[in-house]
Image (cartoon, rainbow, N blue to C red):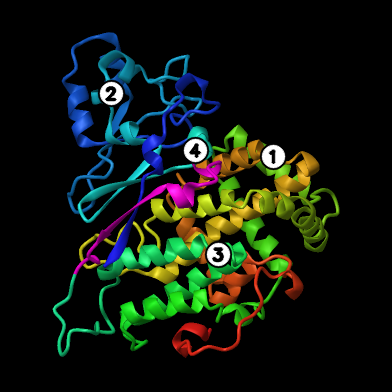
Amino acid sequence: MSSHLRPVYADSFRCIGSDCEDTCCHGWSIPIDRGAWEKYQQLPDVPLASLIRSTMEAQPANADGSEPVPFAKVRMNEANQCPLLTEEKLCSVQQEFGAGMLSHACSVTPRIISVVDGAAEKALTLSCPEAARHVLLNPHLLREGFSAEEGEMGISFVLPGDGNSIPAQANPMAHFWLIRSTVVTTLADRRYPLWERMFLLGLLCQRLDEIAAGSLKQPMREFLFDFERAVAERALRPTMQTLPVDHNAQLDAVLQLAGMLLQRSNILPRFVETVNAFTSGIGNGPGATLESLTAHYNEAHDHYFAPFFDLHPYVLENYLANTMLRGQFPFGRHHARPNAAPKMRQEFIRLTAQFALMKGLLIGVAGHHRENFSLDHVVLTMQAASKHFEHHPEFLKMAHELLTECRLDALRGMAILLRNTPAPEAQLPFAPQPQTSIPSSVVQL
């Protein structure tokens, strides 16, 4: 038996409409599904119906003749804003015809809906400021934002022999709930610094890929038990303390990831404000070098970022939890496609790229605001950045390629992206434990 950990925190989200400092109808491509398109064609001949039809642009069929996804898009105005938005930043379609006339994307945004075992699960996109506040500012999200129901573990196998072991190449989806439970409990374990919890998840993903491919001959359920025991007994802590620290390489990767977003033709003012604060906080200016920027970056981390998040540790935990859920980590959102094989290590690299960028921006913004750095600055930074890369269709792919090119895509490279100043042994939240009988498949890197 395994607990079915389902997110419920998105259920209490409520749009604040005209009171929102941004709008979800600006700065991205708004998709229209076929059902909504057909409803719009049948509207009575009134001025708003004519405007709706004139702004909808059907997409060409795919090369193989199949229907495009999305079926159509909204043709944005010169301000890159939906032309159906009122002066009060409300949707004229919903005002005139009701919520039932909205396209699927407009009716669910900022919710991200996934179907698991026939049930819909919701996360939130942080490109919405109110959604960002709803997720990031809840100190109890990891404890109270999930429902835990007891149930059988996913898909069951007909097993040979005594039926107590699972073939080495078992489909990871058969263990969906146990893997999710392991991921969430590892993320919530504050006995480890956050970068170590992330690194543990990277090791988990790598081993799960190896089991699925058959290169690691261990039943998946048995491995998960060993992994959880190793985490509980601190067996991996000595190894993690030997991992490299390279702030130059970390900052260089953050700059390159941010540069990808700045290459877009439509850079929104809130993101410009964030980038300007970031560059100010790391001492950018005439004559700046990577070494001088890194020195300012380290100062901002040690004096402003780290003390702030020591007081508010839930913020980055909540960001990671929501990002994992909206992307169905570590399986990926495409795991349900026919013949799709989960690439868990790849999903971890993509998660790390997002986290490294967000953390790097926050370090610079903290250095800019110094003692005045606040939760409002955190929400602005994370919402503005999310709006750029969550709606960038190629960002995760490009980020993965960048980290591969920089040779930061292996576990030790991930440590460079995740780790900042190493904690002195005397300040560790617990003392190193003696060697245990944890299998080498878990503890060896």
Q: Tell me residue 83's x, y (percent).
A: 40, 21
Q: Earlier in the sequence, mark 2 or mark 3?
A: 2
**Quick check: 94 above or below 440?**
above
Q: Are marks 3 and 1 in contact (CB under 8 Å)?
A: no
Which residue is nearer to you in this view: 389 or 47? 389
Q: Earlier in the sequence, mark 4 or mark 1?
A: 4
> How dense is the environment of label 1, judged by Cα within 10 Å: few (below 14), some, or many (20 and up)?
few
Name the residue type under label 3: Leu
Label 3: which secondary element:
helix
Name the residue type under label 2: Ala
Which residue is nearer to you in this view: 158 or 42? 158
Give the numbered dot on residue 402: 3
Q: Is residue 186 left or right of residue 147?
A: right
Alpha carbon separation for disc pair 2 and 1: 36 Å
Mark 1, residue position: 374
**Quick check: 6 above or below 10?**
below
Mark 2, residue position: 99
Which residue is nearer to you in this view: 276 or 76? 276
Q: Could you tell me if residue 257 is visible in this image?
A: no
Name the residue type under label 1: Ser
**Quick check: 437 above or below 313?**
below
Label 2: which secondary element:
helix
Q: Is residue 31 left or right of residue 193?
A: left
Magenta highlight range: 134-155
Determine if the magenta segment contains residue 445: no
Give the numbered dot on residue 134: 4
Alpha carbon separation for disc pair 3 and 4: 32 Å
Alpha carbon separation for disc pair 4 and 1: 16 Å
Instruction: Give the number of the mark in front: 3 or 1.
Output: 1
Q: Tell me residue 181's x, y (percent).
A: 38, 63
Give the numbered dot on residue 129: none
